[in-house]
Amino acid sequence: MIVTTAQLFKHAYGKYAVGAYNINNAEQAMGLFRGCIDSKAPFIIQISKGARKYTDKRMLEAIIRAASEIFPEAIFAVHLDHGDEQTCYDCIDSGFFSSVMIDASHDPFDQNVAITKRVVDRAHAKGISVEAELGMLGGVEEDIKVEEGNACLTDPAEAEQFVKLTGCDSLACAIGTSHGAFKFKGKQSLHFDVLDKIKARLPGFPLVMHGSSSVPQDEVARINAAGGQIAGSMGVDVNEYLPAAKRGVTKVNIDTDGRLVWTRVHREFFRDKPGEFDFRPPGKIFMEEYAKFIASRNVLLGSANQLDDLRKSLGK
Ligand code: G3H
Ligand code: 13P
Ligand code: ZN
């Protein structure tokens, strides 16, 4: 069942965070749905602009509709990740997305407000929720690369003003994370002080944490042992997910970790079976491994075992 992120956030707020996982193909979709059903967790499927271009935007919609039929007990939202204004309108008009993210965080404050407000007006007219972003994460985001020194944390006073001016439904805040596999050079740490200040100014308002992959070091070691070269990578400490959730973070974005699972499975498979050229055996292994990974994340986010209670609260 597709619901809005607003419905998911209402149930989660202050208790747990909903995992928001990016998908690009059928294998990721199958692993994601299986992992969320096995762990009895609601979830958010995120589709980036790059994912919509990877095959054809209609392909992902068809895959998600099919997965929803295969797993009828699933409760999830379908969300555009890091949209620009035009892509937001395209998704709002598609009738398929239950929420969109407008990311104008690279623009000056006033421009970010103006763009976000236009998207909010169009989305709300159709009952669709809008996530916006204020502050700047480091790392690589599709077509934009932000060097670590240029990333800037969200200003709590600006956050309050931004939400009032735009009417957005949730806010992605920069609190020290970044996209990709190389998040921290020194110590892993989130700025909980900033989060506390934002929560104090926006009580009850759903916050979003991008760049939340944990970059498991055992995955990285296995990838490197099978020919990969991603030394020096570091992610978010998984023990910081729940403390963030208690401070109003209701959506935690995880994409890179799924790519690492894919890379580990395929590198090891073809290393161990150099004569193999059928992609289905590793694809099967990936779907199983990804499902296990997703279930493990849902436990850490506190969203595991919330499905029955959420269903009741939705009156379904
Ligand atoms: O924030 C970016 C997400 O990880 C999506 O990545 O734009 O390469 O699909 P992508
Ligand atoms: P990661 O690169 O940490 O997985 O972040 C994903 C993300 O924020 C998608 O919007
Ligand atoms: Zn992101």
Image (cartoon, rainbow, N blue to C red):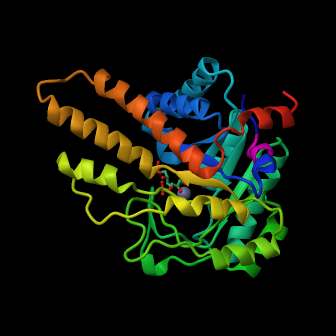
Give 203 or 24, whichever is nearer the viewer.
Answer: 203
Residue that appears at 41% across and 71% down: 184
In the displayed orientation, state which residue is furthest to the left: 275
* In this picture, residue 167 sits left or right of residue 105: right
Q: Does residue 150 appear in this view?
A: yes
> Is 92 within the magenta?
no
> Is 7 within the magenta?
yes
Q: How many numbered markers are drawn?
A: 0
* In this picture, residue 239 sits left or right of residue 304: left
Residue 99 in picture, x, y percent from top left: 71, 45
Q: Quadrant of ligand 3?
A: bottom right
Residue that appears at 61% across and 73% down: 135
Residue that appears at 67% across and 28% down: 74
Q: Give the range drawn in magenta.
A: 4-8
Residue 191 in picture, x, y percent from top left: 59, 76
Whether residue 33 is situated above or below residue 138 in the rendered picture:
above
Residue 44 in picture, x, y percent from top left: 63, 42
Q: Main secondary structure of the magenta part?
A: helix
Residue 152 in picture, x, y percent from top left: 56, 78
* In this picture, residue 145 sits left or right of residue 225: right
When asked about the image quadrant of residue 39, the answer is: top right
* In this picture, residue 45 sits left or right of residue 268: right
Whether residue 207 is situated above or below residue 134 in the rendered picture:
above
Residue that appears at 58% across and 23% down: 67
Give 311 or 209, whichever is nearer the viewer.
Answer: 311
